[in-house]
Every structure is written in C-alpha cells, then in structure tokens.
Amino acid sequence: MIPDRTRLALLVILALLAFAGNSLLTRAALAGGGIGPESFAAIRLGAGGATLLAIGLGRRLVVMPGARDLPGIAALFVYAATFSRAYVGLGAATGALILFSTVQITVIAGGMIGGARITVVQSMGVAVALGGLAWLLAPGLAAPPLGAFALMAAAGIAWGVYTLLGRGSDAPVARTARNFIGTLPLAMALAAIGGVGGSPMAIMLAIAAGAITSALGYVLWYSVLPHLSAITAASLQLTVPVITALGSVIWLHEPLTGALAGASLLILSGIALTLRRS
C-alpha cells in the first residue's frame, strides 16, 4: 500500500532510475571488455533470479515456474541475451532510446492485433517515432552499427512481448520471479557458450544489474503501477532514455551529439502522441 503522494513519487523515481541503470551498468561493464555479453547476461539473470526467489519465498508466493510460464521465460531470455550483445556496439543513451521506442511500438502493434483501435493521432505518433529511428540510422550522422541496432530492436520486441504477456496478471511479482528462475538453465547454457567469468568489477556490475536494477527495480515498479493510470505509466517510461542519456554523459563520459538529441526528441514526441486517446 502506498500511503501518500510523496512516497509514491519517490518510489516511481527509484523505479525509473533502476530502468535507466540497466543500460548504464550493462554498457559500463561491456565497454571496457572486462566481460563478455553472454557471461554478463547469465550473471544478470542468475542474480535477478536469486533475489526474486528470496523475495518470493519471503512473501510466500508461488515462484516455481510451470508450463504456463514458458512464453514469458522465453521472451525474458531473448531480451536479456540480445540486450547485452547489443551494448557491445551501442552507447548507453542510444541503446535505451532504441529499446524503449521499440517496446512501445511492439505494445501498440500487439494491441492492434488484439483488436484495439488506433486513432489518427496515434498513427501519426508511430510514423513520427519511426521517422526518428530512421534519422538515427541515417548515414553520415554517426549512426549506430546496424547489427547492434537490430539486436537492441530485437530486445525491445522481446520486452514488448513480455509486457503483453504480463498484462492483467494478478501477481506480477510472483510471475516475474517464476520467469527469472525459469531462465536459469538457459542462462547457464549461455554462459557455457560465451565463457564464464570476467573482471571483478564487471561481475559486480552484472550482479548489480540483476539483483538491484532488474529484480528490485521491477518489484518497485509493480508496487506503484496499480496507483498509476496506464497513460501515466507509459508516459513516465519515456523519461528513461533521457535519464540514461544524462547518466551516460556524467558517468560514462559518452558524447551527446546533435543527431542523437534531435532523433531522441523526434522519437519521444512521436511516442508521446501514441499515448493520446484522441
């Protein structure tokens, strides 16, 4: 239970910082070459699974995955694996921008397939956001590597599917715990392929990304989500690429180019239009 607006605002801010932290921690670990993307993803999923298992058992939740959880487990694993691999070639801010725009477009497309109607304004928003992505990829504008872009777009699609699968869940923390725990065999296989281990700092960053910014971040988000409208929740998530960009400049010393700033403005404006009902 969230007792007042101040507490709600604080928890929302912490959750959004955690979402941005996923990109920052991943890029920080992978940029220096101290760990491989497969090992990072495996450690992240393992740390997240262990943390959520402890939380679930403490709350007496059902945390052992079953057959009904397989689609969510698959979507979560694809997201984590492609997210890490993409950040070998992407800056933190660019990756977060691609991720969250792709997630939003995937959720909209899923809604349309499910029979939801899209307004003219929302259609314009999708077109504007896609235009921003095209600008980001335009030759001569320090465009991100196409392969890394495709991997992050795949991560966004996977996370969008994961979001759609989880809509209407009456026990989101338990569902998240089951999904993370269910990825552990796949994470172990991924680590075996990519090689286990890394520098102590990179391993610590991977553990933090799993236990703190993923597991605890999701628990925080799900605790405040019932107190937010769907439009407000979606709008708040648009701040994550902005927070990530600021963090990447301050912590990772990544440049904030004019092309990235312009494309970001176009993409976020387009996604904002998709949130309007009319």
Image (cartoon, helix red, strand yellow):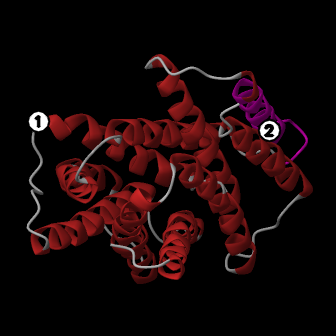
Left or right of residue 216, residue 268 in this image: right
Left or right of residue 7, residue 269 in this image: right
Residue under circle 2? 132
Q: Using the image, determine if residue 3 lies above or below residue 49.
A: below
Q: Using the image, determine if residue 13 lies above or below residue 45.
A: below
Which percent across, then down, holds residue 263? Answer: 82, 46
Which percent across, then down, holds residue 190? Answer: 29, 50
Left or right of residue 99, residue 248 in this image: right
Q: Secondary structure under badge 1?
A: helix
User: What is the distance, in whole Å, between disc 1 and disc 2 at their CAs?
Assistant: 39 Å
**Quadrant placement of the C terminus:** top right
Q: Secondary structure under badge 2?
A: helix
Residue drawn 44% across and 61% down? Answer: 227
Which percent across, then down, holds residue 10? Answer: 52, 79
**Quadrant placement of the N terminus:** bottom left
Which label is found at residue 67? Answer: 1
Q: Which residues are magenta?
A: 122-142
Amino acid type for the residue under numbered disc 1? Ala
Residue drawn 23% across and 47% down? Answer: 186
Q: Earlier in the sequence, mark 1 or mark 2?
A: 1
Whether 85 is among the magenta residues is: no
Q: Using the image, determine if residue 29 lies above or below residue 182.
A: below
Amino acid type for the residue under numbered disc 2? Gly
Q: Main secondary structure of the magenta part?
A: helix
Residue drawn 65% across and 40% down? Answer: 275
Which percent across, then down, holds residue 86? Answer: 55, 49
Quarter of the image for residue 129 reads top right
Q: Nearer the viewer, residue 198 or 212?
A: 212
Q: Nearer the viewer, residue 96 or 191?
A: 96
Extreme front residue here?
4
Residue drawn 36% across and 61% down? Answer: 39
Quarter of the image for residue 169 reads top left
